[in-house]
Amino acid sequence: QYTDPHCGGKQVIVHLFEWKWTDIALECERFLSKKGFCGVQVSPANEHVMVTSPPRPWWERYQPVSYKLQSRSGTEAEFADMVSRCKAVGVRIYVDVILNHMAGLGRNGTGTAGSTFNSDLFDFPGVPYIKEHFNEVCPLNSYNDAHTIKDCYLVGLTDLDQNISYVRDKIAAFLNTLIDYGVAGFRVDAAKHMWTKDIAAIQQNVKDLPEGGRPFFYHEVIDQSNGPVTTQQYTSLGYVTEFRYCQKIKEGIEGFDRLGGVVDYGWGMTDSDHAFVFVDNHDNQRGHGGGGAIITFEKPINYRLAVAFTLANDYGFTRVMSSYYFGENSDLGPPHDINFLTKDVPFNADESCGNEWVCEHRWASIANMVAFRNAVVGTQKQNYFNKNNQIAFSRGNKGFFAMSRSGHMDETLQTGLPAGQYRDLINGRMVTVGSDGTARIQIDNPQEPVLAIIIGSDS
Ligand code: LAG
Ligand code: CA
């Protein structure tokens, strides 16, 4: 239930954080479709507050004003155009939806679609919601008790009561509108702060996709094995974010001997068929939402190793992050002009991005591992090799992966693959697998220290 991303069996989503709809449509056509991406997680599409202090932070989009589809990323018409153009090239759209709350207490004015609102009066005429649709005000000041976590006001955000059928119906109508436009699923923000029975009731009111099947759902539940709310409480509703993985992969990249243990069921980690897996996300890369010890683009070599390993590994459903530079300013919104209009994402000849967009998803060790993960789906890790900060393993008889911290490697290893010539997906060098399945595995690129070969990559 709710676990099919509807992208023809492909295995990797990219979060194009804060990109405009017009740029996402172009990226689907010129890059994502060619590299085998399943789809794109887009920033919230509905109307949100415009925060002036600090000036237009990224997090204003997590304070909804209504479900009208006009946001910092573009208009409703641009949204519709993006969804259909991406779908036409086999790339699906997954929308980040905020169902837990509306804008924060103390905020009022006009949203990005022109609706007025007043949080202190619980007045959101653009929906409309009024006071009776919200929980009683209480501070979310303890993470030891599920009632406080779910019914109190997360960082002062006006907390909707999803037990009310009117609220459920308004939310379901919003999701159904998005489905009518052709989206394939949803990232549910702050799912930890809603009761699973209420989310289940909302999901039951959501329609099938036009092409058939239930929409894909993945729920944001920050579970670090430290409270009463667990990922397992949500697995009947789809995939669930696995934040423990962010911590484990960091430890593993800092000490390769620990990479074999990145998936630790003894620590309560979610089963592979429901674990939504990522190295970092838009929150924890800047110290928000479970932030802390996280690997990000700020350490590009470690980051490539972490994401490549994650895509090669046989755990969960994966999302790749695509960011913008923010330096020390964790509030900073996307690259913008003096009127706070988000800048385009231009491309340089070497495929890197301009205008302060990082575009990790275009880095060779990341982008080219998408084809690997798609090719090896359903197989297990075998022939695990770990020596001197070099890791390698095969995935059944479909693929073989290696990486080296130094960027150099020269080992003869069992690949599990049929004899033949294979082209490394990352650096392009040919690999010859002998009749006994072994091959000389060579890496010689400190910037892109990864090698991956798959069945059918011969040439
Ligand atoms: C999440 N998890 O359930 C995200 O992990 C978390 O990062 C989101 O907060 C949260 N859901 C709400 O969607 C983000 C920022 C917060 C920001 C909030 C609302 O991380 O920093 O809070 O979005 O925009 C901001 C201010 C707070 C203020 C609040 C209400 O930072 O100081 O109290 O707005 O006005
Ligand atoms: Ca709540």
Image: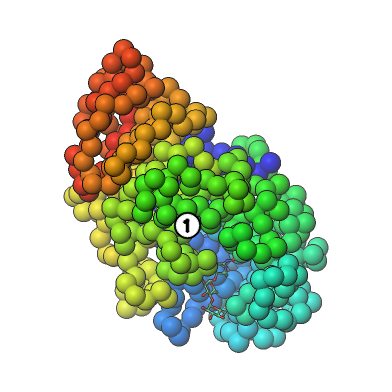
Q: Give the quarter of the figure containing the C terminus.
A: top left
Tell me which residue sits at (65%, 38%) in the image.
213
Q: Is residue 422 above or below residue 448?
A: above
Residue 189 in picture, x, y percent from top left: 59, 62
Residue 12 in picture, x, y percent from top left: 46, 43
Residue 443 in picture, x, y percent from top left: 22, 37
The residue where tag 1 is placed is 247
**Quadrant of residue 49 within the rendered picture:** bottom right
Residue 278 horizontal side relative to residue 142, left or right: left
> Does any portion of residue 302 appear in the rendered image?
yes
Tell me which residue sits at (33%, 29%) in the image.
453
Tell me which residue sits at (73%, 67%) in the image.
146
For the residue marked with disc 1, what is the amino acid? Answer: Gln
Residue 61 horizontal side relative to residue 230, left or right: left
Q: Is residue 247 above or below residue 433?
A: below
Q: Does the beta carbon of the residue at mark 1 sit less than 8 Å from ligand 1?
A: no
> Does any portion of residue 72 appear in the rendered image?
no
Q: Give the quarter of the figure containing the N terminus.
A: top right
Q: Element under label 1?
A: helix
Q: In terms of image quarters, where does ligand 1 lie?
A: bottom right
Residue 307 in picture, x, y percent from top left: 39, 48
